[in-house]
Image (spheres, coloured by chain):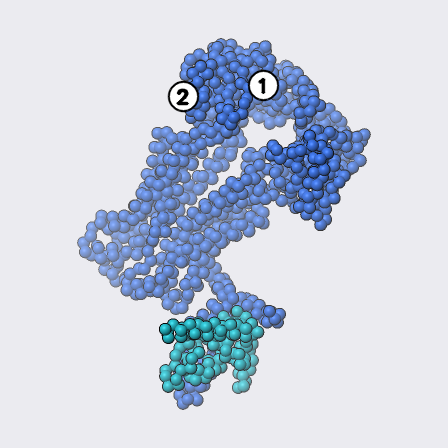
Chain colours: A blue, B cyan
Amino acid sequence: MDPTLWTRRWTRRLRALFQTHAVDAELDEELAFHLDMAAQQNLRQGMTPDEAKRQATLAFGAVRKHREETREARWLSWFPDLSLDVRLGARMLVKYPGITAIGGFAMAFAIWVGCITFEMVNLIVNPSLPLPDGDRIVKIGVMNVQESSEESQILHEYTAWRSALRTVTDLGAYRDQTLNLIARAGDARPIEVAQMSASGFSIVPEPPLLGRTLLADDEHSGAPPVIVLGHEVWQTRFNGDPDVVGRSVQLDEVFATVVGVMPEGFEFPVAHDAWTPLRTDVLEQTPGAGPAVTVFGRLAPEASIEAAQAEVELIGQRMTAELPTTHEHRRPRVVPYTADVMPGDDLLMSIGIPAFAVMLLVLVCSNVALLMFARAATREGELIVRSALGASRRRIVIQMFAEALVLGAVAALVGLVAADIALRQLGAPFLEANVGELPFWFDVRLSPLTVLYAIGLTVLASVIAGVLPALKVTRGISDNLRQAAAGAGGLKFGGVWTAVIITQVAFTTAFPAVLLLEQQLLSRVNNFEAGFPAEQYLAVLIEPEDAAFGSDSQSVAARQAISDRFVPALERLRQRVLSHPEVIGVTFVDMLPRDNHPDRLIQLDEDVATSVARTAQASMDSTEPFRLVQRAYIDAAYFDVLQAPILSGRNFQPSDLIADARVVIVDQGFVDQVMRGRSPVGQRIRYHNPWAEARGEVLPPEPWLEVIGVVKELGMGTPSESGRAAGVYMPIMPGVQGPINMMVHLRSDPLQFISQLRTAATLVDPTLRLSEFKRVDQVTDVLAWVLRLWLKLTAVLSAIALVLSLAGIFAVMSFTVSRRKREIGIRVALGANARQVVLSIFRRPLTQVSLGVAAGAVLGFAFLWRMVSCQDNVCVETGIVSVTNVALLVVYGVFVFGVCLLACVVPTRRALSVQPMEALRAE
Amino acid sequence: MTPAKPSSAPSDVIRGTLELLILKALSLEPMHGWAITQRLEQLSREALRVGQGSLYPALQRLEEKGWVDSEWRATEQNRRAKYYELTRAGRRALGQEAETWRRYVDMVELILHT
């Protein structure tokens, strides 16, 4: 196109958009010129001036109409009118405060849910590094294609990449280590240390707050040990000491000199507290051996991730050729740095959750659309007049869209502010409760992308709430004009609105089933009995130093050495803690009471004899025979410390702690459910995995274990699941299986004992990592917090559904009464009594509400019936159908029914007060 | 456009052809809206009546398509008027539209004579 013409065209378009008045004035001038010319021609033909003018206007036709048509032919012609429509929309918000409040709140809630879910999902599915050129930072890993798993012992590859890779610069590696930092004597606390190449500090070019970062020289095997501290560790463990650089600190049993402190927020590579050099002697590993490391780097200028992938593949092929025995199935791959860090990066997460949020929005906005339609219906006369005056259907639709857009914009603003507050206050704790500690790039607050998404949601909401009713209202508006002239209303509530009302009443009725389920889960968690005074016990997780990976003899020996040290250290710690006057007892358990105990299937002696256990599936739904148990490993003192006497048989003895003692103690739940009241003492049980057998895996049979005693129920099972657990306790020497919980029974407040316990542990062995201190009654706190959060959300959703239902039915009833005023007037005039009038009005909403309540009750009942929970391949139906719950649902259904009918009261009273003469005169 | 007998009553422009007729009128020289209606009536020997009011929305659509361009100029009587002019794209479009129209007329003729 000719550039001059192009420029002129766009100038004209933009003028029409932003200088509407001037362009309109020009159009008026042009039309006036035309009429003048026509009048002059008429004058020349001998007409009088007035006649000439009149005839010219007649020949031209409706000037205003043609003017409007010319304006509408302009580019984005609707845009200049939008500001007027927006102003009108704002006025409507004030004029109809009911719809504004109800519709606005509902839309705000839907947008709030949409924004929060989008932000959360986006953080996990589409993470981005808040670093310069963050998208060019990559991770290089190795996949084992045979086992479809990520290889972690890749130091040998790393060494090769370091010398050969050209497409990736600043190549480095880190190894995760949990080390005990002893900042003050007797105060060892675990911190997350990245044993990292100095190049990690080039990837994130942030200068240290104090001192220096790691240097390449620190990596040499003979270099003195150094550490760089993170801001939080510096603040909490060293009280922000400005002279910390140069201090010597103890890391486990090694002393290192603090050489620097990093600024707040620096947690590279993931969520680390401190950094030590990855020494070159660590790198000298045989292929496929050594500690687990992660390799990172930055794509070289001009290099793409595909080019880097091609290069590592080439190196990989060379290695496979050189080392076919160890590297046959190892395939290196280059991925964005943030890939594979968080769990849940799947289809459900990326599509399912946002789709649910959008569906919620559509549902809510359909209800708002119903209100808008009812409002538009009351303005039908106005719309018909506007149409008669030349407003096109498009014009009216745009105006109603603008009204909904204003409401949507206000709702979006409220929703966004609320989402920002919720994300800042609850986002990070919620994610941490579900997925653990968050990487440094997780900035849980409203992002610009989410704001854009909210704008998209707002437009969608406005289209649903504004355009749909507008299209319905304006359909066949010219016919309506005729009907209105004949004295009858043209608009009707058709099938769509009936469906909307039935759906919303159904959801209103069904939501409480979810609420009920959550409430019962929560009350189950809160009322889950520990069977002993849990608030008097302090629990702490104790872990040994990090064990080596791999199955090579060196790694196996290293692990054994750690275990050999850990077991006696725990015993020494027990003795030291026991000597404290505040302490009543000390015991060890792998899984704390009231925590989630894994389910296992067992067989009894008698099962094998009768082949009962082959019907493994039958045992999953709590029918006969009950063979699902929960297991915990405990030391010999457990029941004494928990002050739970043995009910029959005997307690564990120290001699039972050896590996092949093959004795167990069961709880009363086991006696009642598995044994059906028979004595289990002397019975033999063994664990059993029917799924592995079904898959064709050949496993050596588990050994038979003899039940030697019975104890009361002591918080075995899963707190959120219904039914009693059947507990099986196995004896264990504390520490032989690695991390274990210590429980300390105290005479005073258990939480006051934490620092003394730390000191004791540090003195016993500085490598003991103590974490997760809590009172035993606090075990379910996080679960209860998450459940309470869901409960509140569902309650708000239920309340919104209820209010929307009420408003919708009220709107429909008001509309019906006003529409049928004339008919009611005639009926009353003809002698109809109040009952007949009420019945004729009630019939329709009565049917809609009845259908909705029935559908909702079925939905809610089905939800309660089919609720299934799964854990480690074991799925258990946790349906909570009971007489009480069904009764509650029925009562609630009746309540919804009653409340919905209550919404009909005002319009009905209005209908009954219709005076025949007034009604007929008004028409 | 089939010329009608001058004696018969003027016909309205067939729906959809106004834009083609405007392009044709403008192919001779740039002119303002009033002149276009006059030229069309003149070309049809007074047999065609252009809906004057519908001329301006059509001109606006043609401008929007980039087929005509406009500018304000003084007329011979020294009055300010908006003159429309065919662009190169408009001239091409005229050829294509005219061809389409001829094909259509031939087709209708064919049907009427069978």
Q: Residue at x 47, y 12 (%)?
A: A683
Mark 1 — on which chain does it sit?
Answer: A
Numbered disc in front, either 1 or 2: 2
- Residue A245 x, y percent position in the rendering: 76, 34
Residue bearing the label numbered 1? A588
Q: Nearer the viewer, residue A509 or B27?
A: B27
Q: Which kind of residue does numbered mark 1 sit on?
A: Phe
Q: In the structure shown, which secondary structural element does the residue marked by tag 2 occupy?
A: loop
Q: Mark 2: few, some, or many residues within 10 Å (few <14, many ≥20)?
A: some
Q: Residue at x 75, y 38 (%)?
A: A162
The extreme front residue here reads B114
Q: Is residue A61 left or right of residue A872?
A: left
Instruction: Count the numbered circles shown.
Output: 2
The answer to whether A344 is drawn above or below residue A779 in the figure is: below
Q: CA distance from mark 1 to mark 2?
A: 34 Å
Whether residue A629 can be seen here: yes
Whether residue A748 can be seen here: no
Q: Mark 1: few, some, or many residues within 10 Å (few <14, many ≥20)?
A: many
For residue A624, which numbered disc appears in the image? 2
Q: Nearer the viewer, residue A128 or A85?
A: A128
Q: Quadrant of the N terminus of chain A?
A: bottom right
